[in-house]
Image (cartoon, rainbow, N blue to C red):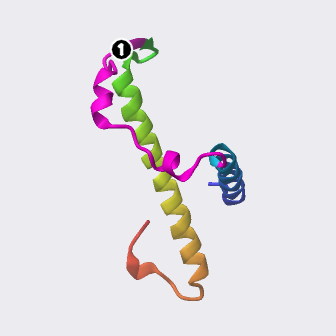
Amino acid sequence: MNLPQTIHHLRHNSQAIRLLIQDLDDDTARRRPDPDSWSVLDWEAARDAPWGKFTAGDMLAAWVAHDILHLRQLVELKWANTVVELRPYIVQYAGEW
């Protein structure tokens, strides 16, 4: 992992998000779609993909899983930073990453 490049991307993305939401009022920003309205979506709508049929439900599931992978990356960065910041002490007793 290229830590300086990752930090650069995180800073860039946070600026982009600020621009996207700067005009949202607090009520709009807090509004969440009603889960009952999701039933009108056709989660079985599909397209052909190189690996086979790809449904809207597959896309949503992949999106969620992809976001969780980003969380894992952030935790790994936090771990690496913590190990550095705790020097000269060692964290071996905590276990392997």
Q: Where does the magenta region start and end?
A: 22-47
Q: Report whether 4 appears left or right of 33.
A: right
In reply to whether residue 5 is colored magenta, the answer given is no
Residue at x-position 58% and y-position 71%: 81
Residue at x-position 34% and y-position 26%: 57
Vertical relation: 89 (above or below) 97: below
- Among the 4 quarters of the image, the one containing residue 35: top left
Between 31 and 68, the one lying in front of the other is 31
- Among the 4 quarters of the image, the one containing residue 61: top left
* Amino acid type at image mark 1: Ala
Vertical relation: 79 (above or below) 17: below
The percent position of residue 64, horizontal first and vertical second, equals 40, 40
- Helix, strand or loop under label 1: loop
The percent position of residue 28, horizontal first and vertical second, equals 51, 45
Residue found at the far bottom of this picture: 88
Q: Quadrant of the N terminus?
A: bottom right
The percent position of residue 97, horizontal first and vertical second, equals 44, 65
Between 26 and 40, the one lying in front of the other is 26
